Amino acid sequence: MMRGVNRGCAPFRSGLQRSRREFLRAGGLGLLGMNLPTLLNARARSASVMAPPSSFGKAKACILLFMWGGPAQQETWDLKPEAPDQVRGEFKPIETNVPGLMISEHFPRLATRCDKLAVIRSVHHRDVNHTTATHELLTGRPIPRPGGGPMNEDWPHYGAVLEHIDHFNRRSPLPPYVQFMPVSTDGAPRFVEQSHGQGAGWLGPALNPFSIDHDPSLPDYDVGDFRLPAEVGPTRRDVRQGLLQLVEQQARHLEQSPQVDAMASHYQRAHALLTDRRAMDAFDLSKEDPRLRERYGMHAHGQAVLQARRLVEAGVPLTTVFWQNDGITNVSVYWDTHNRNFVDLKDRLMPPADQAFSALLDDLEARGLLDETLVVWTGEFGRTPKVGQSVVGGAGAGRDGRDHWAHCFSTVLAGAGIQGGTVYGASDRWAAHPSRDPVTPADIAATIYHCLGVDPELELVDTLGRPLALCLGRPIQGILS
């Protein structure tokens, strides 16, 4: 077990705030009671004790497809055709290419690719609030404070942890993890921006993700801050870099806050990106075959998923694609189908999700990347067993909608380290509670870390100097290859 790993946390930065690389050069690991041989030995030891060994560390990257809002398990992965009308809803199950596994009729493409999927039907937790329930699925930990609190006190996102421990030993100008945020062109509240668990939390703002909120399906799509203005040539760029270094030298004489330190880190990364054409090309979707882009779908979600694949190919370890608003004013925000549950799922939500996920599986496999890329499809919770049922803490449900429900929902994994054609766990006859092999978000987190080659029992040191276990769950052995 690796203990006491802490990089970038405030307690171990006295006086001058240092960047991550400066900290390591100064012997930061040694200050924390861990030298490089110890670190490497711990990594090797953790890889040798995890079982089964073939799945541990098989993934070199992870794409997290986050269906923000809470997909209804009864209409997607866990239909109940024998249940009463008010429970089973309007959709019918269809057969898949895995004998005995049936999923929704509105996932026809995924039905022919279930041999690549592990469907978990028994995920559960207790939080029915969108902006705090996300914390559990993005970190493996429940929100540390009722109601949320400051985001800088969150448990860190998977991507922040990977960068914090320098798990992939990256020396790339590309960001270590990227997230695609929803585009809101209709004035709908941008709840995802307020959702917990998507950043570095108490690890510090220098490890926050690079966020893209542009619609990648539009002709003028770009990644914003990292695009060099046309009037800035190489000479002016180098002058700007010199000025940046001068500002940083002056700043070393001042007491810097974590925010200032993070800003310097982001400026350095931005400059590195601007001077590396291959890195910038990773964000250029125009370089893709138009026919491939069509297969993903020329909509915000499909093109964001394609962008995630390009980032994996370029060496970005973790990308989160939040469901992106299609710009249609409606009573349902994203997958939050309190009303028009069946209409919106059938017409607006499930077809593009089916198309993009299927295209991603095919594309990764064709490029030889599926065996080294973990793909996770999930929401923050599910929907109530009965149509029109409202619950305490939810937002209510119309007669044709379902309210929030965290007691049972489905999550799907595929790719590196995952045994395809698998159904794990089961729900009761109303898809209301697990009836077999219950799974927590902590177990999903442990499985993600396991597949990426990180010991889930690794300990991080928080801002108070306390050693805390990275993950409180266990890898789900039943879906590991």
Image (spheres, rainbow, N blue to C red):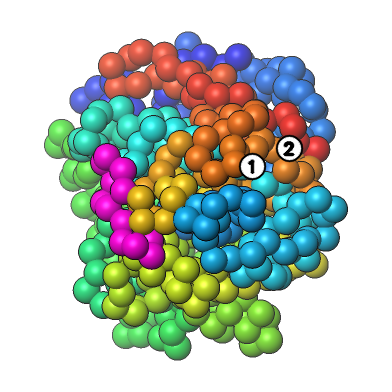
The residue at the point 61 percent across, 31 percent down is 435
Instruction: Name which of mark 2 and mark 1 comes first in the sequence.
Output: 1
The residue at the point 22 percent across, 36 percent down is 147
The residue carrying pointer 1 sits among few (fewer than 14), some (14 to 19) or many (20 or more) residues within 10 Å by Cα, namely many
Mark 2 or 1: in front is 1
The residue carrying pointer 2 sits among few (fewer than 14), some (14 to 19) or many (20 or more) residues within 10 Å by Cα, namely many
The residue at the point 72 percent across, 29 percent down is 477
Instruction: Say which amino acid is labelled 1.
Output: Ile
Q: Is residue 367 left or right of residue 322?
A: right
Q: Is residue 322 visible?
A: no
Q: Secondary structure at mark 2?
A: helix
Q: Which residues are magenta?
A: 390-401
Residue 192, percent across and down?
Answer: 32, 56
Residue 39, percent across and down?
Answer: 60, 20
The residue at the point 46 percent across, 41 percent down is 137
Labelled disc at residue 398: none
Residue where numbered disc 2 is placed: 479
Residue 359, percent across and down?
Answer: 68, 70
Residue 76, percent across and down?
Answer: 58, 58
Q: Residue furthest left?
A: 254
The quarter holding residue 114 reads: bottom right
Give the Cα distance between marks 2 and 1.
9 Å
Dominant SS in magenta: loop
Report the quarter where the C terminus lies.
top right
- Residue 396 forms part of the magenta stretch: yes
**Which one is nearer the viewer's eye here, 462 or 269?**
462
Question: Are discs 2 and 1 less than 8 Å apart at CB?
Answer: yes
Report the quarter where the N terminus lies.
top right
Labelled disc at residue 120: 1
Instruction: Say which amino acid is labelled 2.
Output: Ile
Q: Secondary structure at mark 1?
A: strand
The quarter holding residue 47 reads: top right
